[in-house]
Image: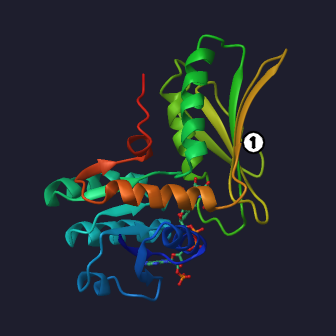
Amino acid sequence: MKIALIGYGKMGKAIEEIAVQRGHEIVAKIDATGSLESLADQQVDVAIEFTRPDAAVQNILFCIEKGIPVVVGTTAWNHEFPRVKAAVETKNGAMLYASNFSVGVNIFFEINRRLAQLMNPHTEYTVNIEEIHHLQKLDAPSGTAVSIANDILGNSSSLKQWKLGEESAPEVQSDELAITSFRQPDVPGTHVVSYRSEVDTIEIRHEAHSRKGFALGAVIAAEFLNGKKGIFTMSDVLKITHK
Ligand SMILES: NC(=O)C1=CN([C@@H]2O[C@H](COP(=O)(O)OP(=O)(O)OC[C@H]3O[C@@H](n4cnc5c(N)ncnc54)[C@H](OP(=O)(O)O)[C@@H]3O)[C@@H](O)[C@H]2O)C=CC1
Ligand SMILES: O=C(O)C1=N[C@H](C(=O)O)C[C@H](O)C1
């Protein structure tokens, strides 16, 4: 496959390594100083976009406009999702977005949903999310933590919204779910969901050891998207069905 990398930072470089290992060709590497226009003049089977929250939507819309299927890993642009969805539909395009491409996190998402269902009647427990990432991360909470939170809220009778605390847990009302974001050197991405009562704690945790899992998932997603039309996510790639 001919792959264009939009964003050639930590993730772009990790994706290049895995894509080449899997026999793909990187036909473009675009960073903040590069021009997307160069993509219009060459054959690109799939673009993979990992840039920054304030750049993602423009890059996605460019790909959709030019008929280039796009895998999107950039986080914190969800408020613009309706605009992107409309563009994909109008242009009969192809996009795959995931807040986290690692297989392990996508299994963790499933466990989190099931745990939330099981815990919902047990009001003596308080649920918390913690996420830890490297110091360069621009957004908080992480996109993964937002996905985890939305799945807990969707399975809770009492919690209505999440609230962020940076470096310490936020004060919350009875209908708020606390997310605490920590920034520490060199942490690729750790997420913990804990349910605490007076008598015990139940905890699930995912800790990425490197960026390899995110990069491999993004390349597998690009292989999946090649030749398809529509909007997809990692549960389509991994064929996870929700009960
Ligand atoms: N979904 C997932 O599984 C994962 C998602 N992410 C997300 O991916 C994004 C990128 O992460 P990461 O690679 O660590 O970040 P980096 O800062 O290391 O890399 C970002 C890259 O994007 C480039 N860039 C910035 N603006 C533009 C633009 N307008 N057009 C094209 N390129 C641009 C930067 O160029 P320059 O260096 O010139 O500024 C840099 O090459 C983040 O939103 C992060 O949250 C990260 C890991 C996994
Ligand atoms: O910025 C990162 O590094 C990561 N971002 C994603 C997120 O915001 O959830 C995924 C992963 O945790 C690494």
30 or 14, nearer to the observer: 14
Q: Against 150, is 6 above or below?
A: below
**Residue 80 visible at all:** no
Disc 1: which residue: 169
- Residue type at mark 1: give it: Ala
Q: Residue at x 24, y 58 (%)?
A: 227
Q: Quadrant of the C terminus?
A: top left
Q: Residue at x 36, y 53 (%)?
A: 224
Q: Position of residue 152 (x, y in %)?
A: 55, 29
Q: Against 162, is 202 above or below?
A: above
Q: Residue at x 34, y 48 (%)?
A: 232
Q: Residue at x 28, y 72 (%)?
A: 62
Q: Is mark 1 within 8 Å of ligand 2?
A: no
Give the class, few, some or many, for how many residues have Cα within 10 Å of label 1's Cα (few <14, many ≥20).
Answer: some
Please identify the quarter of the rendering in which residue 238 is found.
top left
Q: Position of residue 200 (x, y in %)?
A: 83, 18
Q: Against 187, is 31 above or below?
A: below
Q: Position of residue 22 (x, y in %)?
A: 49, 66
Task: State the SS at label 1.
Answer: loop
Q: Residue furthest top?
A: 121
Q: Quadrant of the N terminus?
A: bottom left
208 or 191, nearer to the observer: 208
Q: Position of residue 202 (x, y in %)?
A: 75, 24
Q: Against 36, is 225 above or below?
A: above
